[in-house]
Amino acid sequence: MASLAGPIVNPSIPTNALTCSQFEQQTSYLRSWLNFRPTGPGPFGRTNTRDVAVYYVQGPLVGGFVGCAPYITPNGPVIVVTNGAAGQTLAHELGHLLGLAHVNDVNNLMNPTAFPTSYLLTNQQCTTARSSRHFQSCP
Ligand SMILES: [Zn+2]
């Protein structure tokens, strides 16, 4: 299994340099940084382009965000989460990757501002996530 050869956070990138814009709208330097990820065979006999790369970075990001997703890079999907973010931040960003939008319910994982006390997802959200092209079952 391929692994990153160096630190995930490039020390030459100043803190707060990353904005939450789409991959195509990032500077070429940040695009190359986001695309720095394994590209060979993945752990389940599939290419890594189907796997999700999660980058933990110093934060907060520009705008005070604690996570951004999805970045769809040529090498596969990327989620960015700041160090120290709440655990559900990764789950929330994974929800975005699987096609989920923000909702107003403060107990729902996809609420954009509250830190929910539960990881509630509606049946419709589960159906949406399962139908995502990024959803894959382990063999
Ligand atoms: Zn969100």
Image (spheres, rainbow, N blue to C red):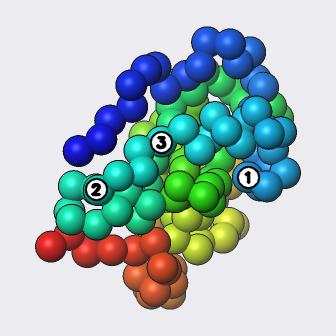
Q: Position of residue 52 (x, y in %)?
A: 44, 55
Q: Position of residue 40 (x, y in %)?
A: 35, 52
Earlier in the chain: of badge 1 and badge 3, it is 1
Q: Residue at x 28, y 56 (%)?
A: 42
Q: Helix, strand, or loop for circle 2? A: loop
Q: Say if residue 88 shows up in the picture.
A: no
Q: Helix, strand, or loop for circle 3? A: loop
Q: Residue at x 65, y 47 (%)?
A: 68
Q: Dot 3 surroundings within 10 Å: few (below 14), some, or many (20 or more)?
A: many
Q: Dot 2 surroundings within 10 Å: few (below 14), some, or many (20 or more)?
A: some
Residue underneath mark 2: 42
Name the amino acid, label 1: Phe
Q: Residue at x 59, y 64 (%)?
A: 96
Is 126 on the left or on the right of 78, as rendered? left
Disc 1 to disc 3, C-alpha distance: 14 Å
Q: Which mark is residue 23?
A: 1
- Where 64 sits versus 1, above or below? above
Disc 2 to disc 1, C-alpha distance: 23 Å
Residue underneath mark 3: 37
Name the amino acid, label 3: Arg
- Where 132 sits versus 31, above or below? below
Q: Which mark is residue 122?
A: none
Is 81 on the left or on the right of 118, as rendered? right
Q: Can you say which quadrant of the picture contains the C terminus?
A: bottom left
- The quarter of the picture where residue 46 lies is bottom left
Q: Helix, strand, or loop for circle 1? A: helix
